[in-house]
Image (cartoon, rainbow, N blue to C red):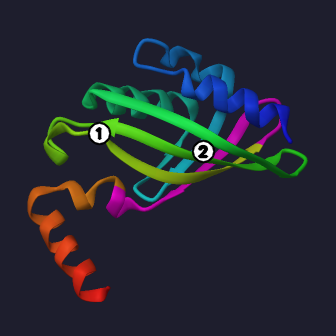
Amino acid sequence: MSDFLRRFARDFAALDKTSLHRLGTLYSDDAVFTDPLHKIRGLANMQDYFAQLYANVTQLHFDFYAFDEVATGSGYLRWTMSYAHPRLANGRLIRVDGCSHLLWRDKVYQHRDYFDAGALLYEHLPIMGRGISWLKGRLA
């Protein structure tokens, strides 16, 4: 069990649009953040990215439920993200499960998220969502 991962998860989950200045307590200046939709280099760019993210959603929350350190300075967090966007799913809350791989020294310098981009976004777009639902039904 990793104290670092638990602290990081607690502090990350506490972020909102008014506290993004605290990203610097979690990430190094040269941190790299990657997910299925983005690759962001540097703390300043991460702050811009998160500011846009929080500006476009009406709700955003992370529930972290597993903390696995696999080597010194390397570990995984498993989580469920809940968010609402006024133009997705008629503004209803969307939940997506995911996993983050973190590399750190005193702060995180590499953060890679793994999640289903369809469940996060594409399935909730008006036209594309219907097509994805139809395709899933055909494949089932």
Relative to 77, 51 lies left or right: left
**Residue 122 on image: x %, y %:** 25, 60
Res 93 label: 1
Q: Is residue 84 magenta?
A: no
Tell me the residue that label 2 is attached to: 32
Residue 19 visible in this rendered orientation of the protein: yes
In the picture, the quarter occupied by the N terminus is top right
Q: Residue at x 35, y 33 (%)?
A: 53
First-in-chain label (1 vs 2): 2
Q: For this view, does 61 lie left or right of residue 99?
A: left
Vertical comparison of 91 with 131: above or below = above
Name the quadrant of the C terminus.
Answer: bottom left
Label 1 element class:
loop
The residue positioned 35% from the left and 27% from the top of the image is 54
Which residues are the magenta region? 104-119
In reply to whether residue 109 is colored magenta, the answer given is yes
The amino acid type found where label 2 is placed reads Val
- Disc 1 to disc 2: CB gap under 8 Å: no
Q: The residue under label 1 is which amino acid type?
A: Leu
Q: Which of the labelled discs sits on residue 60, or is there none?
A: none
